[in-house]
Image (tube, rainbow, N blue to C red):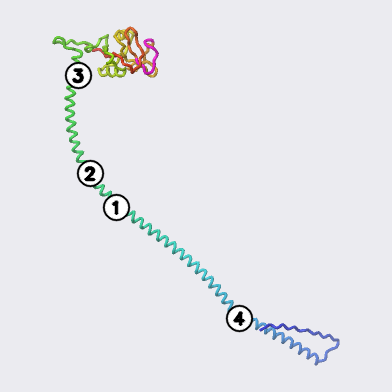
Amino acid sequence: MAEVEVNYASVVFKSNKQAPPEAKKEEETVYDEVHSFKRTEQTADTNADKRANSRRRPYQQLACCLGILCVILLLGLIAVSYILATLSRDVTELNQLKENRTTLLAANRNLTNLNDKLSLDNDNLRRERNNLTVQLGNLTQNYTVLESRITNRTTQNQDKLNVSRAQWSIDAYCPKINNGRRCKACQYGWKLNKSSCYLIHNVNSSDQITWKEARENCSRKNAELAVVQNQQEKDVINGYNGGNWIGLRVEDGKWKWIDGTELTQTSWIEAPTEGHCAVSVKTQGWKSVRCDKRRRWICKQEALSV
């Protein structure tokens, strides 16, 4: 229904004269009709608004319901998404657990196999240990027997060696002469001078040796290369023929005897040169010669008291 706007003209009557009663009554009637029409129009407008509101209310309710439904659907989607995410995570964890379980089972099988192998190896080692223990016992018994035999033979050989050494000493210091023995302070072939014995190796040039070899040769005779204590002994040493090695060499830039003492009489020989040793030359004194040269040599040992 279309709304109709009605304009009413207001009529104002001005008169100094009092209207007649009939006119006044008519005026009041018109006024009442106008107001009655206005009230009717207002009532019609009110009813129209009510009808319009009445028609709009279902749509408003529908819109409200739709909004609530959308909210519910949104919440449902959120809940479903959360549930799906949780389920996906749980599935992933479950798969991971399955993989871990498979790995652990495989590792357990490997460990079981390894344990079985180690147990078998342990049994084998235990049997081998028992066998080795028996063998060790047998070897110990055999060793004890052999040790006893070796001790007996060593004792016998030592006795023989001592007898041989004693016999050698007797023969060396007390050689047989015309079915008798005559003992001397030095071995046969050694020269005595005061309390020392000297052996001069006056050999051919083909048999001459280095200073080191000469020292080893003297050591095998229970002697040493000659060490000179004083001028008198030096003169004795210098009286022997040939250029003979003596127990003097250069060590740490100094002339030293083989017993470790230093040569105090520096005038007896020229200045020290590394790698040189001393030789005694008859009528010429001592000379400095390279130790790897080949010369004759003199051994010295203490004389026996007879």
Q: Which disc is residue 55 wearing?
A: 4
How many residues crowd mark 2 within 10 Å: few (<14), some (14–19), many (20+)? few
Marked residue nearer the N-terminal end (2 or 1): 1
> Which quarter of the picture shows residue 264?
top left
Report the amino acid beneath label 3. Answer: Arg
**Element assignment for label 3:** helix
Q: Residue furthest right?
A: 16
Disc 2 target residue: 128
Which image quadrant is residue 70 in?
bottom right
**Which mark is first along the chain, 1 or 3?**
1
Q: Does 123 sit above or below residue 201?
A: below
User: Which region is colored magenta?
Assistant: 267-277
Q: Which three-letter amino acid code belongs to the residue tagged 4?
A: Arg
Query: Disc number at residue 202?
Result: none
Q: Give the prevailing secondary structure in the magenta stretch.
A: loop
Taking the view exactly as shown, the residue that stands out farthest to the front is: 206
| Circle 3 residue | 165
